[in-house]
Image (spheres, rainbow, N blue to C red):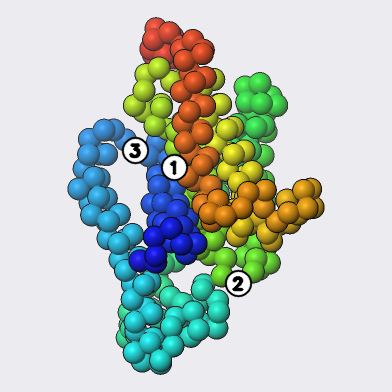
Amino acid sequence: MPAFGSPIWWTLVSTLVLGVGIGVLAQPQLAVRFMTVKNDRALNRAVLVGGPFILMMTGVAFTVGALSNVYFLDTLGQISVVVAGGNTDLIMPEYINSAMPDIFVVLFMLALLAAAMSTLSSQFHTMGTAIGHDFYREFLKKGEIGQTINITKIAIALTILASVVLAYILPISIIARATAIFFGLCAAAFLPMYVGALFWKRMTREGAIASLLVGTFASLFWLGFVHASEAVPLGISQALFGVETVLTGTWTVVDPILVATPLAFIAGIVVSFATKPVPMEHIEKCFEN
């Protein structure tokens, strides 16, 4: 571990460990999977396999990533990032190609493609549904079906196109950074709302919306004006205020997840107590219908 409180310690713990470890719980595509489960019995059955699987996937990834430094130092006399030419996105491909037999490389690539296809499928459907159903049908058409299916298909096609474009134009060493940003934004925007809906009966619709908005905008503000890794390249703070970041010192390496997520929880709780919950008989009537 890096020295406690150092910039690299904050990056490792707040951005990578907490960002990935907590943000993964609130990913939209996982929520879609959860909502398609047949019943509680299926969920209970999945825990036996899913629990050790999640522990292995995260634990193995973190361990192997760190030990790749040891492998390259012993075999080539250089640490991983030097071997990869300064591009952290190439560290694991270089390590797998160098340290593993060819048959493992093939199997690993097939497993990676399968996992990617499953995740992409859920994310594209989530984005398409958000545009076709939530925005077009519910917001614009006020519940009328209209061209919902066609709009959803077009939205999915556009999100696929946007993903391909981003894959080509984003800079090197973006995978870890982009993953942390996405996971952190998911945690701030959705996790307090999910927790309130599942475990707190007093959570109201207004509280959920407030939590979503506060978490999202607090996270975006921190990314654009405080967290140096994003604020400096974006240049928004520099253009508006003449400084690279509006805060200085340790704050510039603290990930947004540690600031935006607690604010979202507080907003959800405060607004829920300030508004009236939906009567239980109304909820039961909706399920009956």
Image quarter in which the N terminus is found:
bottom left
Residue 20 coordinates in the image, percent (x, y): 43, 54
Residue 31 coordinates in the image, percent (x, y): 43, 40
Residue 106 lies, with reference to residue 120, above or below; the image says below
Determine crowd level at label 1: few under 14, some 14-19, many 20+ residues with C-alpha closer than 10 A: many
| Mark 3, secondary structure of its residue | loop
Q: Residue at x 30, y 62 (%)?
A: 59
Q: Which mark is residue 85?
A: none
Residue at far front of view: 249
Q: Amino acid at mark 2?
A: Ile
Q: CA distance from mark 2 to mark 3?
A: 38 Å
Q: On the image, numbered disc 2 is attached to which residue?
A: 172
Q: On the image, numbered disc 3 is attached to which residue?
A: 37
Residue 201 lies, with reference to residue 225, above or below; the image says above
Which of the two labelled residues, at mark 2 and mark 3, occupies the earlier sequence position?
3
Q: CA distance from mark 3 to mark 1?
A: 17 Å
Q: Which mark is residue 26?
A: 1
Does residue 285 appear in the picture of this structure? no
Q: Amino acid at mark 1?
A: Ala
Quadrant location of residue 153? top right
